[in-house]
Image: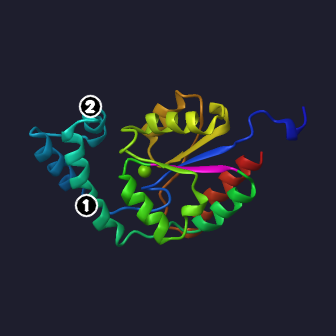
Amino acid sequence: MSNSANPTKLKVIALDFDGVITNLNVDWDAALRLASTAAGYNIENLIPFYEATYGTLIFQKASKLIEQLELEALKDAELAPYTMEFLEKLAELKVSVYIVSMQSRHVVLKFLSKHGLSAYISDVVTRDKCPSKKAQVLYVLEKSHVRPEQVLLVDDSAGNITSCKELGINCFYFEKQQDPQKTKEMWDTILKRVRG
Ligand SMILES: [Mg+2]
């Protein structure tokens, strides 16, 4: 079989937000306290809380409060090195890019707009629509009409990668780097996989 007929060619990349294209310096202890106040009970982990309360008033209240912390953190959040170049190459290769994030939609859209990235992104899937990473990837699968093996999730959370692998998608573990050259190498490794 020739490469051009490779049935597992990647068509969609789902990029995590915090820890991949930027780093948000959110005080997560403060976020847990806000969520606990909104819920009226003690919350130790936000993700199960989001999943358990999704669609309720408690969820909306907590999500709004945490969004304030995220917006505050956004002020100092930088775009990861070489992200723009990476997205330009994906556009040339006709690969669709989605953002899958547990942040709020407003926060992600604001960041993308600030850095001139909006045009490169097919859709932004956040906790407002899907309260877990797995649900977000499922949404991307439904919306993009591709097979799981044509999707690559790029995420800095080993837990997200484990849960999303159950969907049959490809996953790339993105290591948080201080070194711009190492970040560039990760983007290049992903591009190599896209090109097959
Ligand atoms: Mg992350």
Q: Is residue 98 magenta?
A: yes
* Residue 183: percent from left, percent from top: 57, 62
Residue bearing the label numbered 1: 69
CB within 8 Å, label 1 to label 2 = no
Q: Nearer the viewer, residue 105 or 137?
A: 105
Mark 1 or 2, nearer chain start: 2
Q: Is residue 88 magenta?
A: no
* Residue 193: percent from left, percent from top: 71, 47
- Which quarter of the figure has residue 77? bottom left
* Residue 111: percent from left, percent from top: 44, 65
- Label 2 is placed on what type of residue? Ala
Asked if 117 appears above or below 11 in the picture, the reply is below
Question: How many numbered marks appear?
Answer: 2
Q: Is there any visible trace of residue 44 in the rendered image?
A: no
The N terminus sits in image quarter:
top right
Badge 1 marks a residue whose secondary structure is: helix
Q: Identify the residue at image location x=24%, y=45%.
A: 60
Is 47 on the left-hand or right-hand side of 169?
left
Residue bearing the label numbered 2: 52
* Residue 104: percent from left, percent from top: 35, 52
- Whole-angstrom CA distance, mark 1 to mark 2, is 21 Å
Q: Residues within 10 Å of mark 1 (few under 14, many from 20)?
A: some
Magenta stretch: give its range: 95-100
Asked if 90 appears above or below 77 in the picture, the reply is above
Q: Residues within 10 Å of mark 2 (few under 14, many from 20)?
A: few
Q: Identify the residue at image location x=39%, y=37%.
A: 132
- Label 1 is placed on what type of residue? Leu
